[in-house]
Amino acid sequence: MRYLSSFFSLEVFFTLWLFSYQYKKAANLFLNYDITLLLTALLIPWGLILYFKGKGIRKGRFLDYPVAAFLVMSGWFLTTTLWSLSYEYKMQKALCYAVYTLPGFLIGCLVICTEQRRVRRLLMTFFIFSFLLLLECLRTFWGKGLSRITDVLGSNYLVTGQTLVTGLSVLMAWSFTRFTIKDDRQPLRAPLKSLQFSQLPGLLGLFLSGLYVYVLLNLGGRGPLIAFGLALSCFYLIHWWRYSGIKPATHLGLFLAFSMLAWFSLNKVFDHTSSHFIHRLSPLLIGQVDESVAERVSYYQSALAAISQHPITGVGLGGWPMVQGSGDIALHPHNIFLEILAETGIIGSILFVAFSLLSVHNVLRAFSFSSSAHIAIILITLTSFCNALKSGDLHDNIVLFVSLSLCAGLKKQETNDLSWSETQVDNH
């Protein structure tokens, strides 16, 4: 009964809301009714009830620096609409930010992070949702083949890629801690002669990770996989710099091996001989610029021109497309820093950087390599940040703001105990 009730928890509906763009075009019902807006109408009062019902007021979390910085930053972003040249797009952008990004951050920071079980449940729900999407991707590949880039559930490959790497981050964090469990019966520096039984779940996680990588290699989007690769590389480099253990290196090697195994074996199953990701990446490696990259470069140049003209206050939220000459349409520079600089100026950029640093400070000061939750949150945050550097409008990067809310909401006394298992990790 307890597990059944978990399906109707705030975290499950929060996940469905966060990734609603993944499936909102998959059924006629969702086309007639905006599922994102409906879930927002459910989550906001639900979050308020849980906040006032719990210990949120006594903890005074609205006075925490990350929350205060987020509210000040949001207030400035919305204020800049007053001098934006846009009319329709600035209203759309401001409403989306106020209705989606604001409650998403506050619910994550002030409600979900007040209880360890909620954080664990949210991360597990991320993985379950992404795993179901993984199965749907494989079914789509089987039915339509891999001869072209295929949209999944009516959503484009970039959205699908971001959803998959979020779940993959949780899976890799879990498999890392399970694989690096220290056997207390063995000396601390005993050689790794054989895999222990307790490490088998970690191997299963690595096998599933290989399936995720295979789908990401064939979706066609370069950004999500590159962003995840950068985040994972940072994690392993930091761990190696601090501990240089053999098991984490073995974990990385097995991850790469399982990914290659999935690529070669499933390519035979699907009668496929290449990778859309490699096909789109290879021209860049030899200095060729494709249409997508050329378009982004032109956007960056236009954003820099707007910054030089209005450096302090920016051109106003949603005003960059007008300055760029594209009209009053939904368009962004494809880089969150350039977007914030161009539309909200140096003031908005300083507020955004301050908010980001204050948010990650909470989780970094008590970070533990033995905590799956810590690792997952950091990987999701790093991946979302890297992804925001090349794609997504300000309010489209809601996964980044939600991941920052998880970082900001974890207090030091909570992060010391936040782990998915009571086992130790061999860091040496």
Image: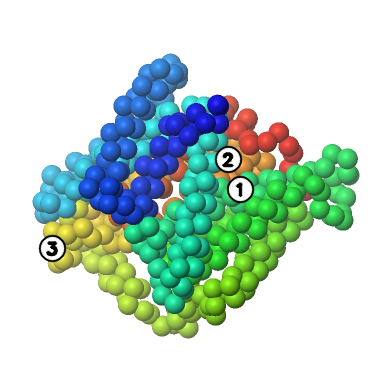
User: Would you call the spot at circle 2 few (<14 residues within 10 Å), some (14-19), or many (20 or more)?
Assistant: many
Q: CA distance from mark 2 to mark 3?
A: 44 Å
- Sooner in the amino-acid sequence: mark 2 or mark 3: 3
Q: Secondary structure at mark 1?
A: helix
Where does label 1 land, which residue? 173
In the rendered image, residue 265, in percent from the top left (x then y), is placed at: 63, 71
Where does label 2 land, which residue? 373
User: Would you call the spot at circle 1 few (<14 residues within 10 Å), some (14-19), or many (20 or more)?
Assistant: many
Q: Is residue 179 above or below residue 331?
A: above
In the rendered image, residue 338, in percent from the top left (x then y), is placed at: 31, 58
Q: CA distance from mark 1 to mark 2?
A: 7 Å
Q: Which label was assigned to residue 18?
A: none
Where does label 3 land, which residue? 327
Q: Which residue type does callout 2 highlight?
A: Ala
Residue 379 visible to an observer of this rendering: no
Query: Closer to the camera, 271 or 283?
Result: 271
